Amino acid sequence: MSKTHPFIPYHPERFSESEMMHRAESFFQLMNKRRTVREFSDDPVPMELIRKLIMTASTAPSGANKQPWTFCIITNPELKQQIRLAAEKEEKRNYEERMSKRWLEDLEHLETDWQKAFLEEAPCLVAVFKRVYELEESEEKHNNYYVSESVGLATGLFIAAIHQAGLSSLTYTPSPMNFLSKLLKRPDNERPYLLIPIGYPAANAMIPDQPRISEEKVIFSYA
Ligand SMILES: Cc1cc2nc3c(=O)[nH]c(=O)nc-3n(C[C@H](O)[C@H](O)[C@H](O)COP(=O)(O)O)c2cc1C
């Protein structure tokens, strides 16, 4: 079929059904071992690896292919300390004043509190920003499309890639998060989306024993 714009052929490899099942089962087994870690070792992680994991995240689909994401890698100890202090200031207010009783109850089993030592302990923090608009040369603002969905998909791929490479991460959402824009001097069209400490779990790391939702509750079939 003739096209007006540039198109290229696309022929991904096809597998037999049993090979697909085998591949899907292995990927499920791998991903099912992923857990959120809140206690990190300070062992360094290779920067080249982090950059590759980010570029994997950046293969995600996005609304109108705007790829509206920016990933900032933070390893500088002073900056990590500033981020921790700013996050803990907000978190203290969250835990002591702003979070509802119900919310605190829902968090109880995680045994988290306002103190966020992982922000200094993890060797690497990645701050994910969503680009809500692009600034054209004419200074005109062009809004991007489905920005949160797109950046969520990229972050999901990022977390999967981190785990697949053999590292652990925490999906962290300090609230409000605008201190990240200031500390990292990000432009106005970028909004903080998530902060992801990455590294190896501490030797004595513990994780909450929580179940995954069952297949019956997740899947509804309309054959
Ligand atoms: C959008 C989002 C925000 C989260 N925010 C926090 C957070 O601020 N602090 C935290 O300790 N964990 C946070 N988590 C981690 C969840 O608590 C964790 O994913 C959940 O308990 C399931 O555990 P698992 O990731 O080990 O399967 C967040 C996860 C998501 C997806």
Image (cartoon, rainbow, N blue to C red):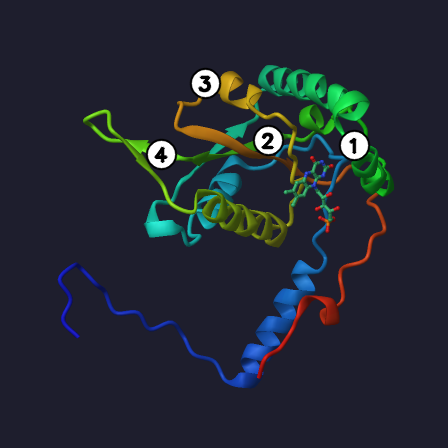
Q: Residue at x 61, y 77 (%)?
A: 22
The quarter of the picture where residue 125 lies is top right
Residue under circle 3? 185
Q: Earlier in the sequence, mark 2 or mark 1?
A: 1
Quick check: 124 left or right of 98?
A: left
Q: Earlier in the sequence, mark 4 or mark 3?
A: 4
- Residues under numbered marks 4 and 1 in contact, where contact means CB atoms less than 8 Å apart: no
What is the secondary structure assignment of the residue under circle 4? strand
What is the secondary structure assignment of the residue under circle 1? loop
The relative height of residue 219 versus residue 38 in the rendered view (above or below) is: below
Residue under circle 2? 125
The amino acid type found where label 4 is placed reads Tyr
Residue under circle 1? 100
Q: Nearer the viewer, mark 3 or mark 2?
A: 3
Mark 3 residue's CB less than 8 Å from ligand 1: no
- Residues under numbered marks 2 and 1 in contact, where contact means CB atoms less than 8 Å apart: no
Cα separation, mark 4 vs mark 1, equals: 33 Å
Q: Residue at x 50, y 85 (%)?
A: 16
